Amino acid sequence: MRYGINETLKKNQLSVTDSRKKILELFMRSNGALAHADIEHQSGTEFDRVTIYRTLQTFVEKGIIHTIPTADNSVRYALCKDECSEGHHHDNHVHFMCDDCGTTYCLDHVIAPQLSLPDGFNATRTDVVVSGKCKNCE
Amino acid sequence: MRYGINETLKKNQLSVTDSRKKILELFMRSNGALAHADIEHQSGTEFDRVTIYRTLQTFVEKGIIHTIPTADNSVRYALCKDECSEGHHHDNHVHFMCDDCGTTYCLDHVIAPQLSLPDGFNATRTDVVVSGKCKNCE
DNA sequence: GTAACTGCAAAATATTTGCATCCTT
DNA sequence: AAGGATGCAAATATTTTGCAGTTAC
């Protein structure tokens, strides 16, 4: 079971503010990744753009969310799993981005494979980004 | 054997201009991916920023280069393989981005595996991005 | 009460567009 | 000569920074 909103914030020594609660809630409700613009729209005019930038940055630093690479290099964020800790997230599932609707999914059950790299290369993180048509845009 | 610079441009119905030759040359000399800023620096003050943007966009449209996703969502480009054609590139090798020096490598010999996706998801492209320390930053 | 967080203004950066001029074919 | 490519100026978009006022604890 995932922690609640307030719990998660406290666990990370963050004060519980409206913007943090709201933004974290958006992530918990979403089954995929969110871009800055998504959050801006979904939260209405409630918060300042800058607050959203800073909140996202704070969440990334605390390991609550992480950025995911996308084929079009747009910046998107997704919730980390519980095991993630500050600065180190273990996120070995695959992300899928729909070319049509732009929705980004976390395919929790598709695991990124271990790769053997050439000598001298040391992996700390492996991201797999699949693009195509999602189940709603077929 | 890869095509020469002028050959590649002509093959894609592009007129052969100084900026295109120079930028394509930079890609052919590089063993990895280049960002807009890399090109701007490596070409000196020879070309306008805007020209670089437009040249990169043209190359992407023609399938000469493609963007690669990166863990930090910076926009980087790499040469497509010869098999790439307009709008469709087949690029199944893995990219590696060094956390220290920022260099992005194309690991041509590490092949991205086939993944089985959930029902309803159709992949047109799969990118694998590995981050860590490269052979020069160990 | 104090430290931390937010909103506003503004700076810095990145990207796109319009148009006149120049270059390739 | 004609069409496309470039350079410059400027419009847009994105992200960061500084600071004063507000809020959580």
Image (cartoon, coloured by chain):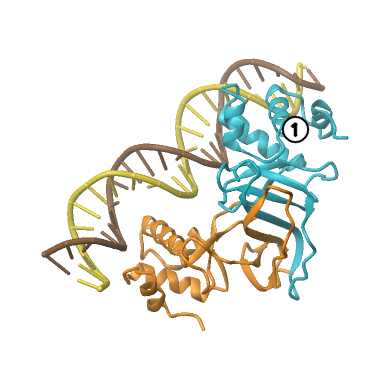
Chain colours: A orange, B cyan, C brown, D yellow
Which residue occupies 65% across, 54% down?
A: B130
| Residue positioned most to the bottom | A1
Q: Which residue is mark 1?
A: B28
Q: Nearer the viewer, residue A44 or B30?
A: B30
Q: Position of residue A92 (x, y in %)?
A: 64, 67
State how many labels appear: 1
Vertical side of B32 occupied by A96: above or below: below
A46 relative position to B68: left or right: left
Vertical side of A74 occupied by C5: above or below: below
Q: Position of residue A7 (x, y in %)?
A: 39, 78
Q: Nearer the viewer, residue A39 or B27?
A: B27
Which residue occupies 53% across, 72% down?
A: A83
B44 relative position to A138: left or right: left
Which residue occupies 48% across, 67% down?
A: A85
C11 relative position to B72: left or right: left
Q: Residues within 10 Å of mark 1 (few under 14, many from 20)?
A: some
Vertical side of B137 occupied by A13: above or below: below
